[in-house]
Amino acid sequence: PDMGRGGLSIDEQKIIEILTKRSCSQRSEIALEYEKRAKKDLVGALKGALSGSLEHLILGLMKSTAQYDASELKSSMKGLGTDEESLIEMVCSRNKEELMEIKKVYREMFKKELEKDVSGDTSGDFAKLLLALVQAKRDEPSNMVDHEKIDNDARSLYEAGVNRKGTDVSTWISIFSERSVPHLQKVFERYKRYSPYDIKESIRKEVKGDLEKSFLTLVECMENKHLYFASRLNDAMKSKSVKDKVVTRIIVSRCEVDLMKVRTEFKRNFGKSLYQTILEHTKGDYQRALLNLCGGDD
């Protein structure tokens, strides 16, 4: 008998079809229903039936957004070597509420503090920045625009970086991690009055490596978070070997949050829809699952 595409049984294909076309809360209901009928755990059954990128994607869908983010953070710090790129993407793009929820869930899932794992796995100023972000001390946006504070912060960033020899990174870290996003957007605008380089050029001149990537990610997410995710997806699918891990993570972690907006930015900036790009660069059941989550073509 025909086992369907890629050796999956017809039932498994049906399960993938159902799970990728439902919301997170519906998926939990399906899991409970499955357990009642089959007398076994759906996640366990899926683990046994699936493998590779498809398994990673489907198991990711069986978690809440915060659980998924927490487990992705955990696996980026597990074993030999840290996956800094993933760590930067997740810590620098999540807002205060998301980070607080992730920390709580991380504690429940792994009986460990996220801060502790991050500081144990990174070092130097990079570690200091990530920790400052994970502590989620960012100000709430205020209805009052504080022009004096905007000016002070812009000047401090300039004086701590471009205007001196070496960089006073700790000043950068505290401003970048503690001020509200609307405030920082105005600070970056104001910054151009002091510095011959805009904030991104200044970051590239002042810091290197993971620290540079982190600061740039923060700025990109404050400028346009949906474009940031769209660019990550575009880069991940452009490379010769498609970075399934990155594609899966962004689609799974944003599908309940803002994937429609990411799709819009994707089409606007890369001249092709996300749907078409997935169609072109992936295959089999993994492709099917991604397309279902993506929703439609633009």
Image (spheres, rainbow, N blue to C red):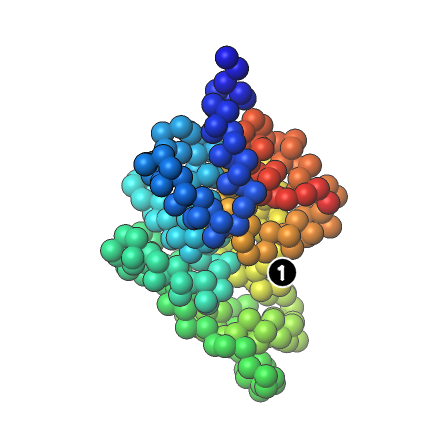
Tell me if mark 1 has few (under 14), some (14-19) or many (20+) residues whose alpha carbon lies within 10 angstroms of its own. few
Seen as rendered, the residue at the extreme top is 1
Q: Residue at x 32, y 36 (%)?
A: 39
User: In the rendered image of this protein, does residue 38 appear above or below residue 254?
Assistant: above
Residue 17 coordinates in the image, percent (x, y): 55, 35
Estimate the x, y position of residue 265 in percent, counting from the top left.
Answer: 68, 52
Residue designated by label 1? 224
The answer to whether residue 144 is left or right of residue 211 is right
Q: Residue furthest left?
A: 111
Which sits in the foreground, 100 or 2? 2
In percent of the image, x 61 and y 31: which residue is there? 281
In the image, what residue occupies the spot 33% across and 56% down?
A: 106
Q: Amino acid at mark 1?
A: Asn
Left or right, 271 with respect to 104, comes to right
The answer to whether 152 is drawn above or below residue 286 in the figure is below
Q: Secondary structure at mark 1?
A: helix
Which quadrant is home to the C terminus?
Answer: top right
Q: Quadrant of residue 143?
A: bottom right
In the orientation shown, which residue stands out farthest toward the front? 37
- The answer to whether residue 206 of the structure is visible from this angle is no
Residue 121 position, x and y percent, is 31, 52
Whether residue 225 is visible here, answered yes or no, is yes
Q: Nearer the viewer, residue 31 or 166?
A: 31
191 to 227, vertically: above or below: below
